Image (tube, rainbow, N blue to C red):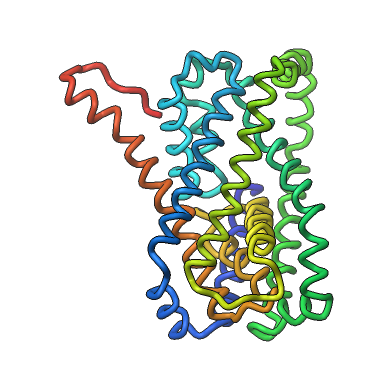
Amino acid sequence: MPGSARSLAAVALAVASLVWLWRAADPGSVWPLLERAHPPTLLLGLVFLAVSLALKGLRWRAMLPAPQEVSRLEALRIFHVSILLNNLLPFRVGDGARVLSPSVRKAATLQQALLVLVAERIIDGLALVAVAIVVLPAFFQATGRQAVMDGLTAPGNGSLLLLAGVFVGGFVILGVAARVRWRAIRNLVVTRLQSLRVDALAIVRQPPRQLAWLGVSTAGAWVTTFLMHWAILDALGAPASRVDPIILATVVTLSTNLSMLAPATPGGIGIFHAAAAAPLLVAGVSSEVAVAYALLVHVVNTVPPMLVGAAGLGGPVLLARVRGTTEPPPPL
């Protein structure tokens, strides 16, 4: 039942998001904007995305207890395969595949790999909270409270408010589902508390050089992500809004990452699009540009990494055939 509740919540969120997006702008006005997108600037956005993902993948490898057991190339392959699976399947299945990868199990136990995954989320969450504290006051000062309400409610006759209600309902359902399983989770934590503590402290008590690399890679990954969003917006040739383009791109990054906290449909379809368009509408960007941007940035953000992940998934098989070996390659 909890799984069914999460699935229903995910579908409801995605449908509400897509309905709002459809009503926010005339589809006939959106397509010409996409056709006129500036290719060199789009390419620049892809470069920023590639750098961001490479830094995140190498950071994840560095956090493993024995990173030397996984080569950098293999770590990036596994990381992109997990992105491929996350975009094809719901509920971040790719993260589970990354943890269970035979290559990763050489460098960490299952528990250690899970803790590294949690530590990744915590580090990224703290980084985004710090950015939000700096950026959001400037964003709302530039837009004004009334502009925020106009931007949220005007497109689709207030359907975004319905979307917000569905978001809240979805999180309530998730909370109920989590409550049902709380006793089992608590027992698991209690029985493994000591080993969890040791493995968790191992992540924190790393050499200063290693901790510095984690900080630099995290900062670099998110700065290039912000720049990727800026480049995609610039590629559409959008007219100036009330907000500085870099601040606007940063707020969009915050919004889209927040949307991924909800129960995820494959690739964040619907939910990601609404989260990308909403800040632009608040900033005074036209609804056509906002919707075109949401569609374009989703394609840029998902398709190229998925292609790399697909190549990584099939690469070992092709390499084994070229070498003429019969030993089956690792599945991930």
Instruction: Inspect this view and state whether residue 54 appears.
Output: yes
The spot of residue 313 in percent (x, y) is 35, 35
Q: Quadrant of residue 161?
A: bottom right
Query: Foreground residue, 59 or 275?
Result: 59
Q: Is residue 330 left or right of residue 44?
A: left
User: Compared to 169, does 267 lie above or below?
Assistant: above
Q: Quadrant of residue 153?
A: bottom right
Q: Is residue 188 left or right of residue 225?
A: right
Instruction: Inspect this view and state whether residue 5 appears.
Output: no
The spot of residue 296 in percent (x, y) is 47, 65
Q: Residue at x 64, y 65 (%)?
A: 245
User: Compared to 165, does 28 lie above or below?
Assistant: below
Q: Is residue 299 left or right of residue 286?
A: left
Query: For the C terminus, which image quadrant?
Result: top left
Q: Residue at x 68, y 68 (%)?
A: 279
The spot of residue 209 in percent (x, y) is 67, 19
Q: How many marks?
A: 0
Q: Residue at x 47, y 67 (%)?
A: 235
Query: Foreground residue, 19 or 128?
Result: 128
Q: Residue at x 54, y 66 (%)?
A: 233
Q: Quadrant of residue 12?
A: bottom right
The spot of residue 98 in percent (x, y) is 50, 31
User: Compared to 53, does 135 lie above or below?
Assistant: below
